Image (tube, rainbow, N blue to C red):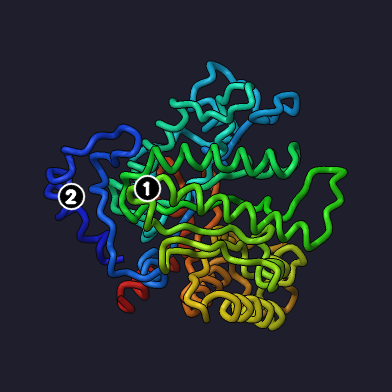
Amino acid sequence: MLRNRIFAVLTCGALLSSMMLTGCGGSGSEFDDGTMRKDMSAMDYAKDMGVGINLGNTMDAYWEDLSNKTSGASLIGEDKPSNYETCWGAIVTTQECIDGMRDEGFDTVRIPVYWGNMMEDDGKYQINEEYMDRVQEIVDYCRKDDLYVVINVHHYDAYLIQNHDKEEVLKATEIIWEQIAKHFKGYSDYLIFEGFNEALGSQREGDNLTEEEIYDYVNDMNQVFVDTVRKTGGNNKNRILIASGYWTNIDNTTKDSFVMPEDSAEDRMMVSVHYIDNVCYWTNRVGGDYWQKYSTDQCELLKEAFSSRNIPVFVGETTSIYEAEHIEAGASVTESSACLETILNMALDYDFVPVLWDVNNNFYSRTEYKIKSESDRTVIAEIAERIDTEE
């Protein structure tokens, strides 16, 4: 967006005005002045968030340890945040990496987080301070660049649900989100909380819940998330929050059984789903007439269920690369970049917030600080220009 291109001119003044803030929990940081824009609707925020990219397989990475019934993660190396940040192949995230995302035209960075790393096995669900500080450091990289930042509970939601009963899961959810919310409550509305990832809708082996009970479970988890964040006060009273869909699946999430949580704040909720064209991708039918119709129909479902009620749709994971094997024979759209362009423009036509799923050295190079494919770079640049023009 245009604001990102003029950001360098404004940085000095902004930093001088914010240096009085500290980086300690609940107080914001030197890179975020804590401003909350009261005149913006949730839809206004969605439009301002543009197109985003995930910092995937990074702070959400963990080494599974089924014997640890508290965190689900085993100790790695020296048990430092960098050990977990890099255990799935990522490099240690740098300011330059985030700078490059901004420069390539992204306006939002989603930081998935596995909060069970470095957690004591004592049933208290206390987030490790070093790990929390490392997440804050990456948030600050993004805020230094005037980017929107979305943090969530990622993979850890699945661990909790699949290893504990519902009562314990709701308890753990409250404890974890209270810690996150208190730590970041001084940050501005450029920081957004997303409750969970894809695990809502799953269940512990042997529980045999009915569909109605599963939907109740999903709705209860989202409600605990919202209630917990709001009660921490400060900027969290009015921060944008994202409720997670049933498996983030569009068909499941648009059913009447999925209920958006009640919220004490007015017009401050979004809903999260993943992959507009997911079925076509996994059945190798991308690029043809069926793909176009299926993707449009999925968007229409979301429009009817949410957008028509002024609830923005956050597509927290969107396909970034379409490998040849996923393209349908005889398709009219055959190049990965053209598929990307089609889906991103479709999402924006519906006022959704599309966020590309990406991992280390995949779509974007975290060492060269640029989108790897020139045709993909062109697509993102043109999308960014479209967004600027529509502002």
Point out the residue furthest to the top here. 78
**Rendered position, 173 above or below 66:** below
Q: Quadrant of the N terminus?
A: bottom left
Q: Quadrant of residue 57?
A: top right
Q: Residue at x 68, y 53 (%)?
A: 200
**Residue under pointer 1:** 233
The tag earlier along the polypeptide, 2 or 1, is 2
**Residue under pointer 2:** 11
Residue 242 in percent (x, y) is at 51, 58
- Res 250 label: none
Residue 101 in percent (x, y) is at 38, 52
SS under mark 2: helix
Q: Residue at x 59, y 69 (%)?
A: 335
**Rendered position, 61 above or below 200:** above
Residue 138 in percent (x, y) is at 39, 39
In contact (CB < 8 Å): disc 2 and disc 1: no
Q: Residue at x 46, y 40 (%)?
A: 180
Residue 382 shows in the view: no
SS under mark 1: loop
Spatial separation of the CA atoms under disc 2 and disc 1: 28 Å
Amino acid tagged 2:
Thr
Crowding around mark 2 (Cα neighbors within 10 Å: few <14, some 14 to 19, many 20+) is: some
